[in-house]
């Protein structure tokens, strides 16, 4: 490994190593009718409690807590701090909240890693949480203005006048979740961006549905074989036990999916709820440690976070984000595809993942967009999302980036493999990728 | 809490000497306000002993002489303002008239405080109960801390009496009859915000503003608080008899006048004298004098002191535990874990799989919802109870409580594993109700760490916990187990590791006899009603249903194995039919939504006194056997154990107290009679002679 070999020659210039020593997540709970049983902080607290309980150090030994969340509840300002205190980390462990849309959970890991790299921290808890079922229903600006006027009204006459000004349109609710999944700059929903990039490579509805079915089948197989041991069961206040990702449909089939109507572009589109990621609640944590912390607490090493790449691109084609982040990462590290044992590419949409695979193999795309002289190559689909992905288990936006990193490490461990990349597309036109290695 | 309660302090205070006064301090601040600080010497809580009250008279003289602008009465104790009268003095009050005369002296003293020529305010935090609340109400104003666990109330009724220092008068004056009588009749305590809504206090403010509020009310004459017109309606001369009758009916549902005269006395006081405060004060004094000499009050006061004695067992040097690990998320394990979390412990709850734990967390959520009103606190309590499938909590726990199936081999296996993973100083506790400690201890490398902590169902209601030590249990382990039990606000009863321990063993013959009576044709309703008329919180058959008939059978078999005798056929039949009581929806009763469906009873073929004595005397006889065998150290502990674990008629002071009151020779004679007619299970225990010695 880089640190040990270079220690003698260039100790001053070699960055510190960043290890991931453990991780845990909640089951991912599909949003069904109304708000789910857990708020974002509740999810993060339950998963964090289990993770911290098995550590040899007390929670107040953490140097920092970094938590990603896009839609914290109104009572969860700086949700990371709320969660850190609820986890018993004590008053003196700083905590901050990060946000990078769909890569929020990955950003939390990167921020934690940076703190360790800079020598500011030895032991950091990082992750993401989201309860998309709790996304608020908002009042429009007209109504907000009217309410402000009402609060300031001094006389009966004024109030009567204000009541007269009310129009039905004032009461039209604004669904925050739908707004959040729409790019305000280019005016496209995320599903529409997937339509764009899948059209570009001629990916058919049948391709997408077949991919979606496989995602469900792979998750179902992983559940049956008990490969998802990163999950901490939850029990809600009604006593209901949640042990598994409940969005999975082991009986999903191409025939069944073919019956669904396109959701985003209703007449001629291909992207349906069945071949898109689900709206889901869930939280995931990773525990990051410096070499010193690993030694001090005698921590087991799950893997090393070798490198991270962020990239940005046309918001209309945000789904290509994984290509824009992973390709430079591979080139910088001088790694061919043969050196990457497993991949996790977040399944925002089946068509989007398939388009990424095409782009990785497309020298024209890579030359035009990234200035690469040759293609990256064909990623073996048997090494990609081997236990299913967000289409089967959901995409709690603040959490997925952390989940795919955690699960990639589990895959590497279970299959005794060496190296993997987790990559994610980001609404707004960005991509993130992390290179991980087992010791 | 912190230094904020330590008022008055600081350089601006000028002390005023109080000659011969040890429990009060007086000082004048820069604004010419006088601060009278209640600070009982050598105690952690303030109580109103006769000495303290005598000194208050001296202090009030000094207040007069000091000519300040206003008076703030406050407490130097972190625990609160004042906990009430000094219960230790109750024993000396044997004469009703003499007691009434002493009480009237206190009335006069409080009236001096009430009629001061400067504004007065009580600055209240923490406990402000009974006589303490009456002292506060004698000030013109009361300001109370809205945070820091402030509790105000009149718990006197729980001791068989009612407020005696003018509380019946002033509470009605400030809150109106309905709210005031409700407080006095139930004995419940309320927080400061509720007290403000009722009119009991002028202001409930956060601790940070308590001094400012006190200065406001002491600094100039402010209007007195008064109940809303609506609240005063009930006190109208014409409405009063009707309201009083309705209240008597309400109280009658919970306690009979014969067994518990105090609440009825409060209602009478108000009905007869509400128009005339002076007459009501005089009547209050006479009434309290009479009540203090009733057997009910004597017995309840004795139990209160015994409760304090049990708490004392937990006040040793042992460090209070913070982390508790519970293995077994069944009814008992789950409820113990939830209760510990509610009482501030960091709790991990372990079972074989998450699917077995849903019920425990559901009940916990309900408990927390019911018991914790503050949102932030409720969140914290919920977060303190953590599901722990892997047993990660074992390594950090101070106390580990086992509550798995009653199977000695399974327990031995578990404790071996626990011992290997636990901290060396953690205590290993079993909640077994039937397995002798020795059967488990053999599996441990260090059996000195093993102790029994036997909770009763439902954990949140039953205050008693048997703390069971065997020959191998170390004194340090016992002490730490008792500290643990006290720390979670339960009463530890040191008990020997004998079959059935104390409570189940004493209870078992009583339940059995109820079932034998049932077999003889006495209707279920008659059996339970007889027990309730005696004063039991619940009839024996309903209690058996609540405990679970399978558990009753299990305990019965163990006791039969140890002491001989048979298990009643009625019980075995029910268990065979899988009618296990409340939990299966049917037992001796059918249950609808957890409540028994009471049917009209048939004829009772036996004499009522026989039904009562057959059940009761078997209980008494077994209690005597336990005393003789030394299952607990003395008769008082037998009594307090049975009252707080089973609801044995509290006003009768426990089984042995009742036997003495009824007359030991009379009881033994009756046992012999029953032995002749019903069989040798009524054979008087040899231990009865122990009770014949004077108390």
Image (cartoon, rainbow, N blue to C red):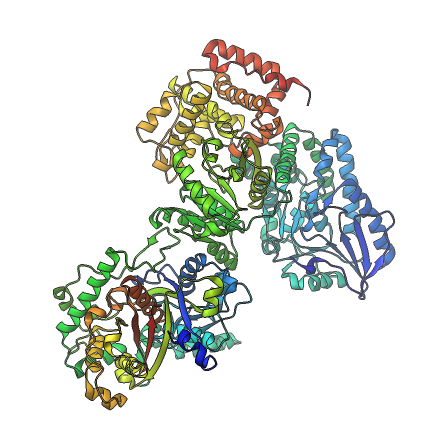
Q: Position of residue B232 (x, y in %)?
A: 61, 49
Query: In the picture shown, does residue B503 fall above or below A91?
Result: above
Camera sees residue B522 = yes
Q: Quadrant of the N terminus of chain B?
A: bottom right
Choose between B68 and A108: the one closer to the eye. A108
Quadrant of the rendered image containing residue A250: bottom left
Query: In the picture shown, does residue B462 fall above or below B506?
Result: below
The residue positioned 54% from the left and 19% from the top of the image is: B621
Q: Is residue B467 left or right of residue B332?
A: right
Q: Position of residue B34 (x, y in %)?
A: 80, 59
Q: Position of residue B278 (x, y in %)?
A: 74, 42
Q: Position of residue B175 (x, y in %)?
A: 63, 50
The residue positioned 40% from the left and 29% from the top of the image is: B554
Quadrant of the rendered image containing residue A300: bottom left
Choose between A340 and B655: the one closer to the eye. A340
Choose between B434 and B471: the one closer to the eye. B471
Camera sees residue B117 = no
């Amino acid at each position: 490994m880089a640190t040990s070999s270079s220690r003698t020659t260039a100790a001053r210039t070699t960055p510190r190593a960043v290890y991931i020593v453990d991780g845990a997540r909640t089951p991912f709970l599909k949003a069904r009718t109304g708000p789910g049983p857990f708020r974002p902080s509740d999810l993060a607290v339950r998963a964090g409690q289990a993770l911290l309980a098995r550590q040899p150090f007390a929670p107040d030994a953490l140097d920092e807590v970094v938590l990603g969340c896009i839609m914290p509840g109104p009572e969860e300002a700086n949700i990371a701090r709320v969660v850190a205190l609820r986890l018993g980390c004590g008053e003196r462990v700083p905590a901050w909240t990060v946000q990078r849309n769909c890569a929020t959970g990955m950003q939390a890991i990167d921020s934690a890693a940076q703190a360790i790299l800079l020598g500011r921290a030895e032991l950091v808890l990082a992750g993401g949480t989201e309860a998309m079922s709790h996304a608020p229903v908002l009042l429009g600006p007209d109504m907000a203005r009217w309410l402000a006027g009402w609060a300031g009204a001094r006389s009966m006459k004024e109030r009567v006048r204000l009541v007269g000004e009310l129009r039905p349109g004032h009461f039209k609710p604004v669904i925050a979740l739908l707004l959040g999944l729409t790019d305000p700059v280019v005016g496209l929903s995320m599903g529409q961006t997937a339509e764009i990039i899948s059209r570009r490579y001629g990916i058919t509805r049948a391709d997408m549905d077949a991919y979606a079915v496989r995602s469900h089948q792979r998750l179902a197989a992983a559940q049956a074989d008990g490969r998802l041991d990163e999950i901490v069961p939850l029990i809600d206040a009604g006593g209901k036990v949640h042990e598994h990702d409940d969005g999975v449909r082991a009986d999903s089939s191409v025939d069944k999916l073919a019956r669904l109507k396109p959701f985003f572009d209703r007449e001629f589109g291909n992207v349906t709820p069945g071949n898109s990621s689900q709206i889901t609640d869930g939280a995931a944590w990773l525990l990051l440690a410096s070499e010193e912390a690993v030694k001090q607490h005698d921590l087991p090493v799950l893997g090393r976070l070798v490198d991270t790449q962020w990239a940005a691109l046309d918001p209309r084609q945000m789904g290509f984000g994984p290509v824009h982040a992973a390709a430079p990462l591979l080139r910088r590290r001088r790694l061919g595809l043969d050196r990457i044992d497993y991949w996790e590419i977040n399944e925002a949409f089946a068509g989007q993942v398939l388009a990424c695979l095409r782009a990785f193999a497309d020298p024209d795309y890579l030359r035009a967009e990234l200035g690469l002289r040759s293609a990256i190559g064909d990623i073996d689909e048997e090494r990609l999302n081997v236990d299913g992905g967000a289409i089967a288990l959901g995409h709690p936006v603040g959490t997925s980036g952390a989940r795919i990193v955690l699960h990639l490490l589990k895959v590497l461990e279970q299959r005794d493999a060496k190296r993997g990349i987790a990559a994610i597309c980001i609404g707004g036109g960005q991509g993130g990728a992390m290179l991980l290695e087992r010791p | 809490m912190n230094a904020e309660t330590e008022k008055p302090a600081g350089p601006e205070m000028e002390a005023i000497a109080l000659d011969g006064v040890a429990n009060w301090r007086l000082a004048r601040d820069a604004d010419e306000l006088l601060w009278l600080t209640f600070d009982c010497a050598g105690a952690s809580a303030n109580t109103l002993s006769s000495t303290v009250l005598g000194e208050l008279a001296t202090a009030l003289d000094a207040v007069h002489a000091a000519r300040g602008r206003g008076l703030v009465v406050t407490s130097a104790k972190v625990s609160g303002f004042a906990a009430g009268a000094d219960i230790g003095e109750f024993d000396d009050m044997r004469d009703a008239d003499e007691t009434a005369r002493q009480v009237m002296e206190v009335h006069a003293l409080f009236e001096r405080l009430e009629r001061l020529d400067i504004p007065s305010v009580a600055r209240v935090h923490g406990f402000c109960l009974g006589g303490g609340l009456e002292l506060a109400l004698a000030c013109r104003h009361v300001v109370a801390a809205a945070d820091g666990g402030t509790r105000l109330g009149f718990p006197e009724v729980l001791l068989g009496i009612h407020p005696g220092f003018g509380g019946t008068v002033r509470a009605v004056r400030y809150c109106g009859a309905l709210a005031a009588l409700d407080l006095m009749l139930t004995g419940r305590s309320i927080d400061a915000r509720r007290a403000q809504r009722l009119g009991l206090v002028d202001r409930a403010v956060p601790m940070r503003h308590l001094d400012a509020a006190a200065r406001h009310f002491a600094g100039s004459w402010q209007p007195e608080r008064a109940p809303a017109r609506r609240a005063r309606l009930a006190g109208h001369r014409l409405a009063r008899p009707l309201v009083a009758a309705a209240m008597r009916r309400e109280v009658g549902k919970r306690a009979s006048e014969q067994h518990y005269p105090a609440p009825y006395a409060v209602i009478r006081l108000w009905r007869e004298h509400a128009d005339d405060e002076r007459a009501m004060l005089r009547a209050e004094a006479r009434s309290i004098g009479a009540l203090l000499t009733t057997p009910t009050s004597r017995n309840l006061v004795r139990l209160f002191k015994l409760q304090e004695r049990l708490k004392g067992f937990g006040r040793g040097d042992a460090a209070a535990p913070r982390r508790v690990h519970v293995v077994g998320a069944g009814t008992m394990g789950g409820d113990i874990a939830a209760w510990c979390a509610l009482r501030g412990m960091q709790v991990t709850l372990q079972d074989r799989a998450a699917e077995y734990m849903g019920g425990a967390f559901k009940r916990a959520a309900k408990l927390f919802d019911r018991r914790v009103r503050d949102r932030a606190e409720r969140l914290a309590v919920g977060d303190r109870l953590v599901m722990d499938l892997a047993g990660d909590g074992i390594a950090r726990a101070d106390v580990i409580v086992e509550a798995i199936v009653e199977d000695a081999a399974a327990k031995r296996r578990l404790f071996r594993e626990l011992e290997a993973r636990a901290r060396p100083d953690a205590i290993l506790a079993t909640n077994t109700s039937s397995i002798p400690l020795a059967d488990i201890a053999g599996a441990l490398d260090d059996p000195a760490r093993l102790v029994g902590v036997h909770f009763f169902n439902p954990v949140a209601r039953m205050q008693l916990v048997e703390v069971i030590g065997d020959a191998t249990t170390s004194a340090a382990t016992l002490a730490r187990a008792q500290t643990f039990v006290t720390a979670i606000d339960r009463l530890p009863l040191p008990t020997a590791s004998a079959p059935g321990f104390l409570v189940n063993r004493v209870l078992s013959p009583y339940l059995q006899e109820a079932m034998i009576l049932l077999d003889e044709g006495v209707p279920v309703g008659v059996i339970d009603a007889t027990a309730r008329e005696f004063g039991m919180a619940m009839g024996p058959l309903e209690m058996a249903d609540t405990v679970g008939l399978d558990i009753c059978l299990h305990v019965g078999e163990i006791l039969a194995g140890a002491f001989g005798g048979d298990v009643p056929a009625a019980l075995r039949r029910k268990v065979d039919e899988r009618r296990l009581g409340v939990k299966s929806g049917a037992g001796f009763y059918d249950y609808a939504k957890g409540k028994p469906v009471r049917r009209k009873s048939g004829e009772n073929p036996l004499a009522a006194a026989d039904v009562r004595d057959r059940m009761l005397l078997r209980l008494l006889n077994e209690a005597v056997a336990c005393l003789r065998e030394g299952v607990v150290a003395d008769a008082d502990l037998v009594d307090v154990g049975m009252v707080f674990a089973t609801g044995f008629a509290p006003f009768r002071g426990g089984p042995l107290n009742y036997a003495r009151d009824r007359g030991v020779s009379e009881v033994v004679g009756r046992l012999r009679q029953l032995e002749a007619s019903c069989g040798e299970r009524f054979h008087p225990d040899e231990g009865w002679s122990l009770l014949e010695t004077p108390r």
